[in-house]
């Protein structure tokens, strides 16, 4: 069994592919640096991430694949699913080894799985856009906690930057402990040194004086629109996943 160790980054994965073709050794397993190798590993190689080599692989993919398929590969990486790195490794190698485009060959289980995972991540990014709820803090920054099942927050940054370009805001992933802050000029990635409450809500003393009023108005508006006779809990959960409810003002 051949093992490649890498730093579990996308750049590291692309470098691993570069090393595989350079050495003409293709791994049976990809492991994170420091993980214990399985028994009977004949060959092990530690990948040293390289911007230059990773970029060469990525440019090669861009020549072989249309832009939307390259985006799908990034979405699969952002899924953080176990085995997604090995899936991408196989898919990319098949792309380079084939004279014909493989993106439409859904008879290949790897091609089909890449498409299905990418769709799930894209859908999760859509949910984040739909179900984010901002609360205004005392210093005028609008804060919104989210907790998507996939690492889809980066896919929504352009949307929030364009949609809320006239106000400062933070959208923070509570599960992965990072977020993005827009200061009216640019959007940057941030992390908080102090942990936030589990529900993602800052202390009321840190909120704007009129924030509670606006939350009550939103709840009353939501309640006024509800037609009790037409409530369909099953459809409601399907269209508004329960995992987002704890951050929705109207659900508190």
Image: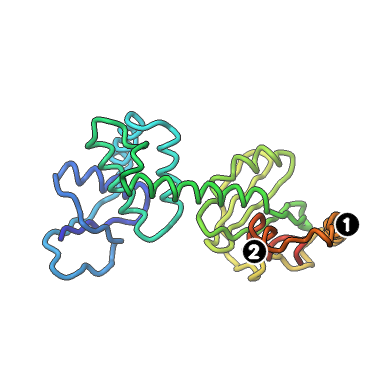
Q: Is residue 185 left or right of residue 93?
A: right
* Residue found at x 77% / y 61%: 231
Q: Secondary structure at mark 1?
A: helix
* Figure quadrant of residue 51: top left
Mark 2 neighbour density, 10 Å: few (under 14) some (14–19) many (20 or more): few
* Residue found at x 58% / y 54%: 179
Where is residue 170 shown, x and y percent of the image?
A: 66, 52
Where is residue 212 shown, x and y percent of the image?
A: 84, 62
Quarter that holds the C terminus? bottom right
Where is residue 129 shown, x and y percent of the image?
A: 64, 48
Where is residue 31 shown, x and y percent of the image?
A: 28, 61
Look at mark 1 in the image and give the residue it sits on.
224
Question: Residue 200, labelled with which disc?
Answer: none
Q: Is residue 252 left or right of residue 220?
A: left
Q: Is residue 211 visible?
A: no
Closer-to-camera residue (210/163): 163
Q: Residue furthest front?
A: 229
How many numbered circles are shown?
Answer: 2
Mark 1–mark 2 distance (CA, rounded to whole Å): 21 Å
Quarter that holds the N terminus? bottom left
* Residue found at x 28% / y 47%: 90
Which numbered disc flags the more N-terminal residue, 1 or 2?
1
Q: Secondary structure at mark 2?
A: helix
Q: Is residue 181 visible?
A: yes
Closer-to-camera residue (66/208): 66
Q: Residue furthest left?
A: 42
Look at mark 2 in the image and give the residue it sits on.
242
Judge whether 116 appears above or below 146 on screen. above
């Amino acid at each position: 069994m051949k093992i490649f160790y890498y730093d579990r980054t996308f750049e590291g994965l692309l470098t691993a592919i570069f090393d595989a073709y350079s050495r003409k050794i293709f791994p049976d397993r990809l492991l994170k640096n420091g993980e214990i190798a399985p028994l009977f590993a004949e060959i092990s190689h530690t990948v040293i991430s390289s911007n230059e080599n990773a970029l060469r692989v990525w440019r090669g993919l861009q020549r072989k694949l249309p832009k939307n398929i390259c985006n799908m590969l990034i979405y699969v990486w952002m899924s953080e699913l176990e085995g997604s790195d090995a899936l991408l490794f196989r898919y990319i190698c098949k792309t380079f080894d084939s004279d014909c485009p493989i993106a439409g060959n859904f008879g290949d289980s790897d091609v089909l799985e890449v498409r299905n995972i990418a769709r799930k991540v894209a859908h999760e990014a859509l949910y984040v856009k739909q179900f984010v709820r901002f609360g205004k803090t005392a210093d005028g920054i609008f804060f919104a906690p989210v907790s998507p099942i996939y690492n889809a927050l980066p896919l929504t940054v352009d949307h929030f930057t364009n949609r809320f370009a006239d106000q400062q805001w933070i959208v923070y992933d509570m599960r992965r402990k990072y977020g993005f802050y827009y200061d009216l000029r640019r959007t940057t990635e941030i992390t908080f040194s102090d942990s936030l409450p589990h529900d993602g809500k800052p202390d009321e003393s840190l909120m704007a004086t009129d924030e509670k009023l606006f939350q009550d108005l939103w709840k009353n508006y939501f309640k006024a629109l509800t037609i009790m006779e037409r409530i369909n809990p099953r459809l409601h959960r399907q269209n508004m996943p329960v995992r987002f409810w704890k951050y929705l003002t109207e659900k508190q």
